[in-house]
Image (cartoon, rainbow, N blue to C red):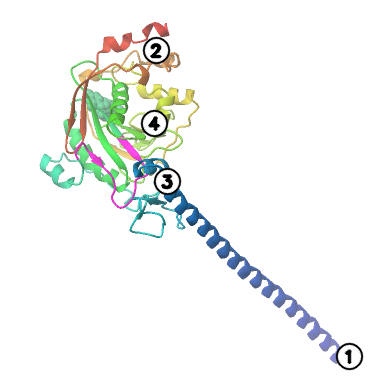
């Protein structure tokens, strides 16, 4: 009898325990599915509200301004459900984003055309090869993606003198690279004519000043002609902070030579450039101008960003030192008291003569004359 009660007691305890665990299980399952349904309902409602709001915004903009105005001011209105692209109206009939004929998408944040790491071509292409391979480039070295509205309007500015072979190799590589990034871009070769000392930084200031007269660029990539990017994830775009692009160059064993380096290739937005008054115009000959820009950026409380070393990779074409670009022995002194000149030496004190603007099939060449004596005189009284 005692055995029987013991057995009964044990079975009852087991039954109660399993009932207890079963109920917990059921509760959890119910909880999860309720939450899931609620999440979907809330999501759907908020999407509907956003869509309605978006349609209204488009129709009201159409009433007031031209579509061009609308594009410039309002193109990123709503994130798509996928979170990548944004809907954009591309004509007056775009009143509802579900209407795929009249509404198109802005280009996605990350281009689907990227291929990642790719060894650059190092040969010098013939003119015919360049022409046939890059037949899609518009006159002046311009391109804008089809099928989506570009997010970035980028002027690529190359300080240049007598590097025609490098230029051919550069163009052959850079055009497809930029096209894959779905940018609205243009290539500007800023050529210093004559035999005066080369002034890289001033040429870059001129490139900025001249390119904004040609197109509505908002982002400026300053680029040596001998640098070939190895990975198209290295985006040539501008963000809230200035970006040093050429962080890992083969010449330096793909390592950053020093933390404050800003030479080679860099990207600055229009407002970033304006807030530091561009580059200094006073660095004639090789060296120092990029470090001075770093100092300007630090002085204005910017933080320079870089892509990772795995992405910001470049091959540098080999070359010697040109006679007209000897080491600038004054560069240390200029750097030291640079802060005194930031406000008065730069974009607001540019003096140069444009000798010729040539619209070539693969680039725009702006040839300028720089007079060293004149440039050094500008505002000289101010610093002493
Ligand atoms: N550069 C040029 N012609 C010259 C000197 C310089 O076109 O006579 C341009 C070119 O874009 C080059 C950049 O200025 O890539 C930087 O000069 P360099 O390559 O001599 O400097 P480094 O290799 O030491 O950075
Ligand atoms: Mn070089």
Q: Nearer the viewer, mark 3 or mark 2?
A: 3
Q: Say which residue label 3 marks.
A: 61
Q: Quadrant of ligand 1?
A: top left
What mark, if any, has residue 270 been given in the picture? 4
Element at badge 2? helix
Above or below, 2 against 68 in this view is below
Q: State the separation of the CA atoms marked 4 and 3.
A: 26 Å
Q: Nearer the viewer, mark 3 or mark 1?
A: 3
Q: State the separation of the CA atoms marked 2 and 4.
A: 29 Å
Residue at the image position 55 percent from the left and 64 percent from the top: 40
Q: Is residue 370 left or right of residue 338?
A: left
Q: Residue furthest bottom?
A: 1
The location of residue 311, given as percent across then percent down, is 37, 44
Above or below, 228 against 145 in this view is above
The location of residue 156, given as percent across then percent down, is 29, 34
What mark, if any, has residue 2 been given in the picture? 1
Quadrant of the rendering where the C terminus is positioned: top left
Which region is colored magenta? 139-155
Q: State the separation of the CA atoms marked 3 and 1.
A: 88 Å
Q: Looking at the rendering, which quadrant does residue 171 occupy?
A: top left
Q: Is residue 118 left or right of residue 14?
A: left
Element at badge 4? helix
């Amino acid at each position: 009898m005692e055995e029987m009660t013991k057995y009964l007691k044990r079975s009852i305890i087991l039954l109660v325990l399993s009932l207890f665990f079963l109920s917990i299980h059921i509760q959890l399952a119910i909880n999860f599915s309720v939450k899931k349904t609620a999440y979907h309902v809330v999501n759907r409602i908020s999407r509907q509200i956003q869509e309605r709001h978006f349609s209204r915004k488009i129709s009201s903009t159409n009433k007031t301004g031209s579509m061009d105005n609308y594009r410039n001011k309002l193109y990123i209105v709503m994130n798509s459900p996928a979170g990548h692209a944004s809907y954009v109206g591309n004509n007056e009939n775009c009143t509802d984003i579900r209407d795929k004929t009249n509404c198109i998408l802005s280009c996605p944040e990350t281009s689907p055309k990227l291929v990642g790491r790719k060894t650059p071509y190092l040969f010098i292409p013939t003119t015919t090869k360049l022409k046939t391979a890059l037949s899609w480039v518009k006159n002046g070295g311009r391109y804008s993606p089809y099928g989506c509205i570009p997010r970035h309007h980028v002027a690529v500015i190359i300080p240049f003198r007598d590097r025609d072979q490098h230029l051919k190799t550069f163009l052959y590589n850079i055009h497809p690279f930029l096209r894959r990034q779905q940018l609205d871009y243009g290539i500007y070769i800023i050529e210093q004519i004559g035999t005066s000392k080369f002034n890289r930084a001033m040429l870059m200031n001129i490139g900025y000043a001249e390119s904004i007269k040609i197109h509505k660029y908002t982002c400026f990539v300053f680029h040596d002609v001998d640098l070939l990017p190895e990975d198209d994830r290295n985006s040539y775009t501008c963000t809230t902070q200035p970006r040093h692009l050429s962080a890992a160059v083969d010449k330096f064993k793909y390592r950053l030579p020093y933390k404050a380096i800003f030479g080679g290739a860099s990207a600055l937005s229009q407002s970033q450039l304006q807030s530091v008054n561009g580059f200094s115009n006073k660095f004639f000959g090789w060296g120092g101008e990029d470090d001075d820009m770093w100092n300007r950026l630090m002085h204005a409380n910017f933080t320079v960003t870089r892509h990772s070393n795995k992405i910001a990779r470049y091959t540098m074409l080999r070359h010697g030192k040109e006679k007209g670009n000897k080491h600038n022995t004054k560069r240390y002194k200029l750097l030291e008291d640079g802060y005194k000149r930031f406000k008065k030496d730069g974009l607001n004190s540019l003096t140069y003569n444009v000798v010729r603007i040539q619209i070539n099939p693969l680039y725009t060449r702006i040839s300028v004359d720089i007079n060293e004596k004149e440039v050094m005189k500008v505002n000289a009284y101010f610093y002493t």
